[in-house]
Image (cartoon, rainbow, N blue to C red):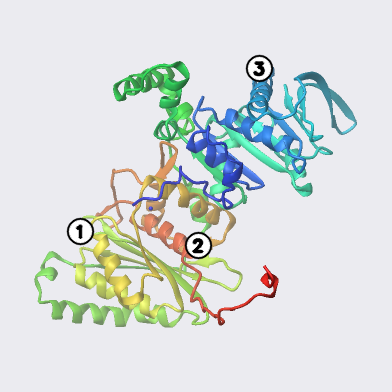
Amino acid sequence: MTEKNNFRQPENHNPPNDNRTPMVLLPYQQRWIADTSPVKVCEKSRRIGLSWGEAADSALLAAQTSGMNVWYIGYNKDMALEFIHDCGNWAKFYGLAADEVEETEEVFADGDDKQAVLAFVIRFASGWRITALSSRPNNLRGKQGRVIIDEAAFHDDLPELLKAAMALLMWGGQVHIISTHDGVDNPFNELITDCRAGKKPYAVHRITFDDALADGLYKRICLRRGIEWTAEGEAAWVAEIRQSYGDDAAEELDCIPKNGGGKWLNRALIESRMSPYTPVLRYDQTDDFALLPEHQRAAEVADWLSGSLKPLLAALDNTRHSFVGVDFARNGDRSAIVPLIRQQNLNLYTPFILELGNMPFKQQEQICAYLLAGLPNLLGAAFDARGNGQYLAEAMQDQFGGDRVQAVMLSENWYRAHTAPFKAALEDGTLDKLPRDEDILTDLRAFELIKGVPRIPDTRTRGQDGNKRHGDTAIALVLAHYASRELNIGAVRVASRAVRRESRLTNGY
């Protein structure tokens, strides 16, 4: 995923509205503003000016007759005052008609309890206003417009604040949630995880310190300070910034929440999705097998396929759709092949799992082709295409088409985007009936949070047969689940009509 940079575009986003984007802003600020999703969330590095960019958009929004009110919620008075001053400066820059900043009180209700909250207000000639609040009211009901929750991870009761803010969406409002991280178990990090898992349909942006630098942050700082930019100067400045944050640099600058180490999937969750009736087929070969003529190897494997795999394929419901994930290995580790069957209720289950040990390339191709051809209504197969796995992925694409078989280059960004939905599927039971098998349990438990991203570490384990394992089946399971989400569109039928040569609407013009 060249690798698709998830940092450069929101992970779920509406088409950008570039007409509203001031060019004085840096590209990452522009991308944030251009995303017009009703709810958008940004995990970001500290001090990159995203709130300043938000102020630019808020001033334009409140100044339009077709705009709306803006409610900014920081967690202290200084944040509120800084934001409202930024909005005022932008209004002057745009030449917008606006009053001076007004210090006042806003009354928020929590049940029968009413509380006055210090607020700073700018009123525009349009009739709309920007209100920056110095504390965190837990009830925004009855308000209308856009809500900006800044440094969301540091609010006392973010879930309740979000619940109140979401009420504004009913009347066409917007909710913008911006924050650096404050630990793995923080509600803000949980919100980000839920968004990536597909549990919440919000747009997600990620802007690290390095992303901001790549978009010209330090060059803009040099311009503001009136100093000449040099590569050496930028490198020295970056080193100084990172040194100043010390052990907190990963969280404060790289969007990696603290305490991001340890096992990612707990044993109880995995075992709750296991079934004793789901078989694991393990087919190992000796080193001497690879020395046999290819036709002999093919004949022996064909016999095994007929006797072991064919009955399992024949037992599957041929009205259902299927998906496959494949993690390739030649020797040392195992190749893991995981089919998934989609049921009537759209849940997925594993009918069996196939593991190959020390299997020659041609025979892996033979086995994969037999499996993909025998599965009912195959919609998508995702192959790990790193290293030698690329050969097998391309061979399957040649046979079954690139629309059904995808070669996946596993990367940190790919894991970040697609492990969360996998875990969510285990948690809610939409992925079920994994084999009750000690080695597969070990593979899934091998996932660790490495810099905040679930990955399989380089260390290897020993299977029950004494052979090495490297989380191969766990990776194949994630790939299969990915295929069920991303490669499940099926065949597309295109219908067209003749080009219209005339339109009555244009007659006379």
Which of disc 2 and disc 3 is earlier in sequence? 3
Disc 1 residue type (three-letter): Asn
User: Would you say residue 419 is visible in this rendering?
Assistant: yes
Q: Quadrant of residue 366?
A: bottom left
Which of disc 2 and disc 1 is earlier in sequence? 1
Side (left or right) of 262 relative to 386:
right
Q: Nearer the viewer, residue 96 or 318?
A: 96
The residue tagged 1 is: 331
- x, y percentage for residue 288? 10, 68
- x, y percentage for residue 315? 45, 81
The residue tagged 3 is: 78
Disc 3 residue type (three-letter): Asp
Which label sits on residue 35? none
Q: Considering the numbered disc 1 on the image, is that residue within a helix, a strand or a loop?
A: loop
Query: For the residues carrying marks 3 and 2, which lies nearer the camera in this image?
Result: 3
Query: For the residues carrying marks 1 and 2, which lies nearer the camera in this image?
Result: 2
Q: Considering the numbered disc 2 on the image, is that residue within a helix, a strand or a loop?
A: helix
User: Would you say residue 190 is visible in this rendering?
Assistant: no
Number of other residues with Cα within 10 Å of mark 2, as a class: few under 14, some 14 to 19, many 20 or more: some
Disc 2 residue type (three-letter): Arg
Which label sits on residue 485? 2
| Distance between mark 3 and mark 2 Cα atoms | 44 Å
Q: Are marks 1 and 2 in contact (CB under 8 Å)?
A: no
- x, y percentage for residue 320? 52, 77
| Distance between mark 3 and mark 1 Cα atoms | 60 Å
Determine whether 56 is above or below 328 in the image. above
| Distance between mark 1 and mark 2 Cα atoms | 30 Å
Q: Quadrant of residue 334?
A: bottom left
